[in-house]
Image: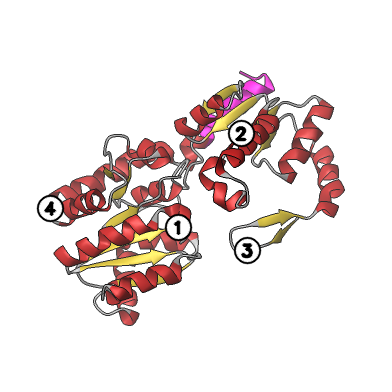
Amino acid sequence: MSNKVSDEDRLAIPWYGPEALRKLDEFNPDVVHIQTEFTIGAMGRRYSRRRGIPVLSTCHTHYEMYIKEYLPLLPEVLARKTIRGWLRSVYAHDDLIIAPSRNIRDVMRGYGIDREYVVISNGVDERIFHPYPLEAREFRKKLAEGHAGFDEGRLLVYVGRLRQEKNLDLLADAMVRVFREEPDTHLLMVGEGSRKAELEDFFRHHGLEDKVAWSGYMPRAQLAIVYSAADIFVFPSKTENNSLVTIEAMLCGTPVVGVNRMGTAEILEGDLGGFLAEDDAEDFADKILSLLRDPTLLAAKSAEALQHSQHWTIGNSCDQMERIYERLFGIA
């Protein structure tokens, strides 16, 4: 019941609303869990309050981090006030709010949204994301068919949108040094976005275009093989609430170098399963190089990533959510 606007965005089709509400009545829910602040979320909240059904919601996005995406024409100060006021109106009467990270919980409280909060990660499916050693070797061989040398040396992987909010200039600047000091290293960029052409030009300008491969979007099952093929997952974003790609990589036994901000910092919490760098290209490169130059450390961080990431599996998150639902149902 949605219209695809882009590979990442969809709009609800309003004339399907009555049918959706009819199906909800047939289902007869005891609690409604809202996952969006927009049209469908508003419809779910109205439906629930008219029928006296508890409303549980999850806030997935730190909207202030995306001001230029959502409100590009407003001055930043006004845009921030607008976003905060809008979120207060959306969540003001929800019975319980799930936050995927401690950071987003604290942000919501800072907005004056005085509700009950529980922190539960969105979780990653451990049935899909786990090490694939045999498939990883085949993937490296296949990758080398179109990109000479990618089956040898070390492979770094980035997965995500190629857009401004992902802080990709930091990664690009850091990789110039990494490629210079460890020339048997390659980088695979998985994803699409408005920055792709600019990033391609950057590496071409530095004579490094043969060091970088671009794959576009990949199916989730294929991503697990890509993570398994990587020696390090590199993720420069500073705006992640839950940093699911970080968890995906770690579940595949791949250590992470990320920026010490928000969800990534919360997951690695003290360099467990990788290293946290400051928002600085030199420090980011330092962390990558420390792993590339020390095979024992790299192996230890790989094992650590695999173990530590079990805290953020779908199974673990579902167990926590089940207990919340039971409490709202009045079972526990």
- Please tell me whether mark 4 or mark 3 is closer to you in this view: 3
Q: Which residue is rendered at x = 59% and y = 63% of the image?
A: 7
Distance between the Cα atoms at labels 3 and 1?
15 Å
Q: Which mark is residue 84?
A: 2
- According to the picture, the residue beneath numbered tag 1 turns out to be 160
Give the crowd class for mark 1: few <14, some 14-19, many >=20 residues within 10 Å: some
Question: Sequence order check: which comes first, mark 2 or mark 1?
Answer: 2
Q: Secondary structure at mark 2?
A: helix
Label 4 and label 3: CA atoms lie apart by 42 Å
Under circle 3, the secondary element is loop
Residue 313, image x, y percentages: 44, 41
Q: Is residue 138 visible?
A: no
Q: CA distance from mark 2 to mark 4?
A: 46 Å
Closer to us: 176 or 103: 176
Residues at circles 4 and 1 in contact by the CB criterion of under 8 Å: no
Give the camera-side residue of 183 and 165: 165
Image quadrant for the N terminus? bottom right
The residue carrying pointer 2 sits among few (fewer than 14), some (14 to 19) or many (20 or more) residues within 10 Å by Cα, namely many
Q: Position of residue 242 (x, y in %)?
A: 46, 41
Q: Which residue is mark 4?
A: 294
x 27%, y 53%: residue: 281
Q: Is residue 256 above or below residue 158?
A: above
Q: Chief secondary structure of the magenta span?
A: helix
Closest to the camera, between mark 4 and mark 1, is: 1
The residue lying at 82 percent from left, 52 percent from top is: 14
For the residues bearing labels 2 and 1, Cβ distance under 8 angstroms: no
Res. 6 mark: 3
Q: Nearer the viewer, mark 2 or mark 1?
A: 2
The kind of residue tagged 3 is Ser
Q: Secondary structure at mark 4?
A: loop
Label 2, label 1: how far apart the Cα atoms are = 27 Å
Question: Which residues are the magenta region?
Answer: 318-332
